Image: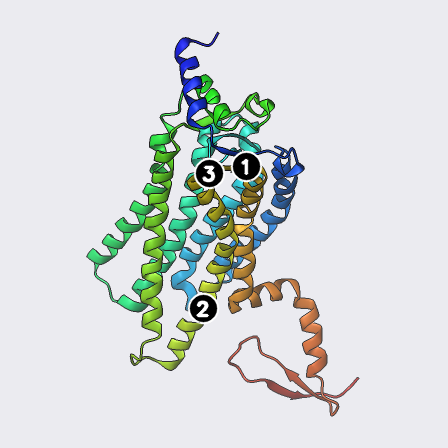
Amino acid sequence: MINLRTQLTYNSVIFRFVVFMCNWRNSTFEQETFAPSILHKLAIIEVPIHSLAGYVVLFKTPTRMESVKWMMFTMHICGAYLDLFLSALSTQFFLLPAAAGHSQGLYTYIGVPVKWQAYMFISAICLAGVSILGFFESRYNALVKGRGTSILKVKKRLFYMIGHYIYAFVFILPITFTPPEQISGKFYVRAMLPCVPQEIFDHPDFFVYALDITLLTWIIGTAAFIITGECIYFFTRIVLYLSSTKAKSEKTYKLQLHFFIALTIQISIPLAVVICPIGYIVFAFAASHFDQALNNISLNMMAMHGLISSAVMLTVHKPYREAVLGMFCYKYLYKKLHRNSLHPDGTVVVLSSSHTAKPVIERRSHI
């Protein structure tokens, strides 16, 4: 039996969202099964690629890149976790711009409440952003500020980054700990989205995360603005430094420049993939526009961010590219080099494993 208060809430919501734009085509792209049918299979590809990328960063990072090793690894782990979260752990089916829906994946199977899965999803996005910020901050202090730092400055940097990681875990908690009463919440969302089939709302795990999407938008928007602004600041300062005419070792300068360009490519290509879905989500909230097909497609695109990032990282950074080629093409390359090293006059060029060592020429006779 629905009490009077719930009925009044329902009636007021109907009048409030009369002009809410709601589209439902009853297509495959709008179904609950659309995202899992793609993302669960994608996880099978993601796990080995992310594992390979993590292994290469940990064990194949050359000495000259040792200072950025752990920042690279942290950035990789955060991006990979976001990918696997959406693909296998908690595939989202959210009715954006309403903060409601349910999840499908391992977390749902083991009984993790939907509200905490939504919390982990938003926090995972923020963590990925903070890890990118941490890398730019590290490069800024190494290049612009210089390596000679005091203990006090190191502690300040440590508190700065730890504070950002803590913020990523707690900034959405006020919404998480104050969910609406679910019966009235479902009526609220039902009135917002009259075009959505009733069976969506009847799903046993359907959960209304928040009624006031204005507050939710401001909290998430503020976090995005802060982290993005800091990344732009550090990126701009690094670019200005590298483009300056300050006296520096030509070799060191080229190494720094090439690495920064490779890093920028590594970050910018995956970001380009998620700009469209994020842009649509912002538009959906701002214009009160609902289209579940675009919601599902946007989440699918976001789930490919880490996979593309790992693939680009293994491609654009020369040491990692050579390490992967050496792991999978060793026998082929060895035979090719051995065949090319045999001269017609019986001279064999024995190639040293060191890049700087000169070839050793030995004279041997054909058998």
Please state which amino acid type lies under the numbered disc 3: Phe
Tag 3 or tag 2, which sits nearer the N-term?
3
Q: Which residue is drawn at 22% across and 58% down?
A: 153
Relative to 128, does residue 316 appear above or below in the rendering?
A: below
Q: What residue is shown with label 1?
A: 89
Q: Residue at x 32, y 79 (%)?
A: 248
Which structural element holds mark 3?
A: helix
Q: Nearer the viewer, mark 2 or mark 1?
A: 2
Q: What residue is shown with label 2?
A: 261
Residue 307 drawn at (x, y percent): 56, 52
Q: Distance between the residues labelled 2 and 1?
A: 33 Å
In the image, farthest residue toward the right: 367
Relative to 335, does residue 209 appear above or below in the rendering?
A: above
Are discs 1 and 3 less than 8 Å apart at CB?
Answer: no
- In the image, is 72 to the left or to the right of 171? right
Q: Residue at x 40, y 54 (%)?
A: 132
Q: What residue is shown with label 3?
A: 121
Q: Label 3: how many residues lie within 10 Å, few (<14), some (14-19) or many (20+)?
A: some
Q: Which of marks 1 and 3 is in front?
A: 3
Residue 12 drawn at (x, y percent): 41, 20
Tag 1 or tag 2, which sits nearer the N-term?
1
